[in-house]
Image (cartoon, rainbow, N blue to C red):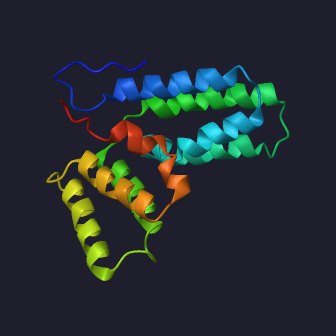
């Protein structure tokens, strides 16, 4: 369970990584590849923010082109997941994820909406906007346009700033 102190407005890298490790531990015991696929799917953008190349490698492990036993797939996934989570996301890697998410809305947004969102993303890249505010805007769009795949992403949950009461 993740607990925030009263003066904390967002989760730390360690808290986010611990949350993902805890999620993985829960599905690892099942040894069900469908659970692993689901885990990877809902954490895709979060893993991408940590290390895009390793996120792809994790996806390839699940695809299991080498026909490894399921237990070996889970062991290999756990090892590479740990390496992925050790790498702290950067503004550049978060910006890349934001661009990927933006791609889901290209056909839905008006020119003004696209311009506004891109400006917000560029402001994040230059340090003038928080990641949380960009994610809140994107999360609102995921619900408005019913992008079910995006709504399930832990990336929105874990990187959005938490408003204090």
* Residue 14 in sight in this render: yes
> Residue 112 is drawn in which quadrant?
bottom left
Q: Nearer the viewer, residue 97 or 132?
A: 132
Q: Is residue 90 left or right of residue 40?
A: left
Query: Is 7 on the left or on the right of 30, as rendered?
Result: left
- Return the x and y of residue 91 as percentages of the image width and height: 29, 48
Q: Residue at x 52, y 46 (%)?
A: 152
Could you tell me residue 92's position as x and y percent?
A: 32, 51
Q: Is residue 114 left or right of residue 32?
A: left
Image quarter hosting the N terminus: top left
Residue beneath the point at 61% across and 37% down:
39
Residue shown at the point (55%, 26%) measured from the top left: 23
Tell me where residue 63 appears, x and y as whole percent. Answer: 75, 46
What is the quadrant of residue 40 in the picture?
top right
Looking at the image, is 78 positioned above or below residue 146? above
Does residue 54 show up? no
Vertical comparison of 20 with 103: above or below: above
């Amino acid at each position: 369970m993740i607990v925030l102190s009263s003066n904390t407005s967002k989760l730390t890298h360690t808290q986010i990584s611990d949350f993902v490790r805890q999620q993985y531990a829960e599905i690892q015991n099942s040894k069900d590849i469908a659970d692993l696929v689901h885990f990877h799917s809902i954490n895709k953008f979060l893993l991408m923010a940590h290390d895009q190349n390793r996120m792809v490698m994790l996806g390839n492990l699940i695809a299991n082109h080498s026909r490894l036993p399921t237990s070996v797939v889970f062991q290999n996934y756990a090892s590479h997941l740990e390496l992925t989570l050790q790498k702290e996301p950067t503004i550049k890697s978060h910006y890349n994820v934001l661009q990927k998410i933006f791609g889901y809305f290209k056909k839905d947004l008006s020119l003004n909406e696209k311009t506004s969102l891109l400006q917000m993303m560029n402001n994040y890249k230059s340090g003038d906007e928080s990641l949380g505010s960009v994610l809140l805007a994107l999360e609102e769009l995921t619900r408005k346009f019913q992008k079910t795949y995006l709504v399930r992403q832990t990336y929105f949950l874990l990187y959005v700033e938490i408003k204090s009461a």
